[in-house]
Amino acid sequence: MNYDTRFIEGKVIAKDTMEFLFEKPEGYEFKAGQYCFLNLPDKGFQDERGLRRHLTLASSPREKELLFATRMTGSAFKNTLKELSGGETITIEKPLGHFTLPQNTETPLIFIGGGIGITPFRSMLRYASYARTGHTIMLFYSNRMPETTAFLDELERTAEGNDSISFIPTMTKMQDSHEQWDGLTGKINPAMIKDNHHDWDRADYYIAGPPKMVDGVKGIVQQMEVLEARIHVEKLTGYK
């Protein structure tokens, strides 16, 4: 089933990254962490991948609008998104995906996101925080530098407002940054996880980001001898 939705606005939220806000169609229900396909009107941009692409629903199911965020790569789809005007209508499809919050709230959750892989976690953390679901969540978020980190301030505020949510950002290329950073640096590794989460060995792990990043982090978690059944991954391919 397809739904018509009207575009509200788009804005830059980090270097080479934008968010796009749409009205939520009546009856459109989804779970935090899911994605959907967007069908855009032809505005003169064409490439082999076309104007139908899937993006994660970065908004919480409790929010009044639908939010998407993506790296701006210069593809026909991304250029068309950028050229949408307020009030313009596009078509979205039904929500898909199983990378969502578990019903069980007793097992601690460790989220690991890289780059634009933050989008499903933004949705899940906002939902868990405002709905008071009872999940205990620690989010590790890896980026090159603060300038490229989407939702950094917002995620810090979300964690500050909920004792069950912790936020651990780390920067891997601060030598290229013009901003001050007092937090962690370096790639996510077993020591970083173990030093910050005392129940790391009984947690469930959720990893999201570009395919190469997801495979690398999954390998790190496997080195920690975490059971395969406790590792859940979401490879984001719509970021290109």
Image: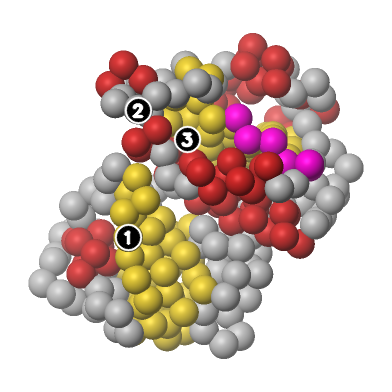
Q: Foreground residue, 122 or 91?
A: 122
CB under 8 Å between discs 2 and 3: no
Please name the predominant secondary structure of the magenta segment in the image. Answer: strand
- The residue type indicated by label 3 comes to Gly
Residue shown at 81% from the left, 24% from the top:
199
- Residue 146 sits above or below residue 84 on the image: above
State the separation of the CA atoms marked 1 and 3: 21 Å
Q: Residue at x 54, y 48 (%)?
A: 154
State whether residue 101 is above or below residue 156: below
Few, some or many residues within 10 Å of mark 2 (<14, 14–19, 20+):
few
Q: Of the residues under marks 2 and 1, which one precedes in the sequence?
A: 1
Residue situated in front as seen by the camera: 66 or 13 = 13
The residue that mark 2 highlights is 179
Q: Which residue is mark 3?
A: 114
| Res 195 quadrant in image | top right
Can you give x and y, in whole percent of width and height, for residue 131 in the image?
A: 76, 62
Type of amino acid at the residue the image marks with label 1: Lys
Residue stretch rendered in magenta on the structure: 163-168
Disc 2 from disc 3: Cα separation: 19 Å
Q: Is residue 25 left or right of residue 124?
A: left
Q: Which mark is residue 11?
A: 1
Q: x, y percentage for residue 85?
A: 25, 77
